[in-house]
Image (spheres, rainbow, N blue to C red):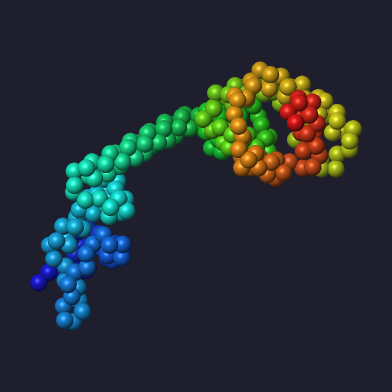
């Protein structure tokens, strides 16, 4: 007699929606229909559903299953691709577990990777500075943690940087220039001691940093930045 859609789905350990989706994408052949219009699934359909369920459980995508066959060459290529993807996933999961374990031992904010969050927290960065650092360290080179760690470890907030953090948007010319002159030496020393590795910053990355600066700092603070960068010959 065969099985209905609901019955074959239950036998295969899947859902009605999944069976219908497999039909839609050509992954499962349509069964015969009885005179009353009801579908009748046979053993071949059940076996195919079991195969699909087994392969998806191994990590195969539906698109890969649809494209592959039991030819040894095609099967080997598909197995190799899935195995490589699983290995990469395992590596990511192991790294994630390692970072979670470190966070449990030493809780720090999670806006930055652990190796950067610890020195950033110790450096007592302002919320704006910390957010900017998160953006810059990511869009420029998120694999260059040692450089950013060393820079943060040598950063020391002082009265001038705290005054900068509280600088009102309508601060006068004299105040802006005074702050720039006070902050510039420390910034120059950090740049000299920890020069950034040679790299080409893509236009999209540069645009992201500029947008972050505009979001995080008021006009007076941005003007101080420009004065500092000019004194450091960065612009």
- Could you tell me which residue is drawn at 84 percent across and 33 percent down? 176
Left or right of 81: which side holds 215? right
Left or right of 59: which side holds 40? left
* Residue 109 visible: no
The outermost residue toward the left is 1
- Could you tell me which residue is drawn at 63 percent across and 40 percent down? 203
Quadrant where the image shows the C terminus: top right
Residue 41 image offset from top left, x and y in percent: 16, 67
Q: Nearer the viewer, residue 173 or 122?
A: 173
- Could you tell me which residue is drawn at 60 percent across and 38 percent down? 202
Residue 141 image offset from top left, x and y in percent: 56, 32
When the figure is inspected, residue 60 is found, relative to residue 10, above or below; the finding is above
Q: Nearer the viewer, residue 29 or 91?
A: 29
- Could you tell me which residue is drawn at 18 percent across and 49 percent down? 70
Residue 172 image offset from top left, x and y in percent: 89, 38
* Residue 28 visible: yes
Q: Quadrant of residue 209?
A: top right
Q: Quadrant of residue 162?
A: top right
Quadrant where the image shows the N terminus: bottom left
Residue 168 image offset from top left, x and y in percent: 81, 41
């Amino acid at each position: 007699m065969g099985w209905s859609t609901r019955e074959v789905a239950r036998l295969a350990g899947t859902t009605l929606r999944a069976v219908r989706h497999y039909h839609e994408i050509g992954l499962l052949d349509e069964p015969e229909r009885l005179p009353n219009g009801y579908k009748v699934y046979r053993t071949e359909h059940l076996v195919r559903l079991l195969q699909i369920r087994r392969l998806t459980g191994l990590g195969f995508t539906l698109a890969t299953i649809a494209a592959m066959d039991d030819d040894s060459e095609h099967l080997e290529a598909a197995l190799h691709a899935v195995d490589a993807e699983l290995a990469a996933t395992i590596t990511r999961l192991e790294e994630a577990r390692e970072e979670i374990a470190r966070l449990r031992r030493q809780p720090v904010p999670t806006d930055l990777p652990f190796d950067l969050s610890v020195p950033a927290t110790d450096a007592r960065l302002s919320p704006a500075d910390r957010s900017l650092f998160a953006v810059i360290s990511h869009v420029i080179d998120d694999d260059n943690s040692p450089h950013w760690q060393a820079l943060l470890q040598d950063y020391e907030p002082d009265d001038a940087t705290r005054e900068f953090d509280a600088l009102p948007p309508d601060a006068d010319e004299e105040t802006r220039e005074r702050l720039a002159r006070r902050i510039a030496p420390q910034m120059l020393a950090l740049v000299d001691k920890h020069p950034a590795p040679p790299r080409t910053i893509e236009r999209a990355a540069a645009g992201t940093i500029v947008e972050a600066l505009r979001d995080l700092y008021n006009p007076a603070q941005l003007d101080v930045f420009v004065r500092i960068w000019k004194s450091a010959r960065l612009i």
